[in-house]
Image: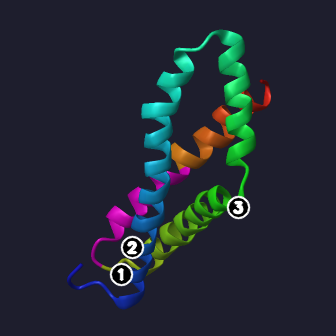
Amino acid sequence: MAGMTTPSKIMTLLCALWFSLMAGFFFAFSSTGMPALARMTGAEGMLAMQMINIAVANSFFAAGFWVALVLAIIGAAAALIWRSPGWVSLLISCVIYIAGAFLVTGSGNVPLNQAL
């Protein structure tokens, strides 16, 4: 982070922290929740997923998910404006989060979950 301004360091650290937090959530669910659901019958899996959908609608998950999105948007804009050392990495990480986490979840996973 040598050569970076203090605001760009703070933005990079905040993005890294929140993106890592959400990546941990997605990893934990993918590596434990999905295999567990796959071992259930269709009806059992659907009921379990419905309960997960209810449980995940809480302020802790919402804070992690929405703060990460806000940080991704601000981080991408800041990277483009400040152009301090490392700005390309910050921009790419923000775009990957927006596309890979938020858009996939919002356009794919949430509609599938609501259909249950």
Disc 1 target residue: 9
Q: Quadrant of residue 44?
A: top right
The disc placed on residue 12 is 2
Secondary structure, mark 3, is helix
Residue at x 67%, y 11% (from the top left corner): 42
Q: Secondary structure at mark 1?
A: helix
- Residue 57 lies within the magenta run: no
Could you give the CA–CA distance between mark 2 and mark 1, rounded to whole angstroms?
5 Å
Q: Is residue 32 left or right of residue 112?
A: left
2 or 3: tag closer to the N-terminus: 2
Q: Is residue 36 left or right of residue 66?
A: left
Asked where in the image residue 69 lies, by quadrant, the reply is bottom right
Name the residue beneath numbered marker 3. Answer: 59
Q: Are marks 2 and 1 in contact (CB under 8 Å)?
A: yes
Residue nearest the viewer, comparing 46 with 77: 46
Q: Position of residue 77 (x, y in %)?
A: 52, 71
Q: Which residues are magenta?
A: 85-98
Q: Check if mark 2's residue and mark 3's residue have beta carbons within 8 Å.
A: no
Q: Is residue 90 magenta?
A: yes
Alpha carbon separation for disc pair 2 and 3 = 24 Å
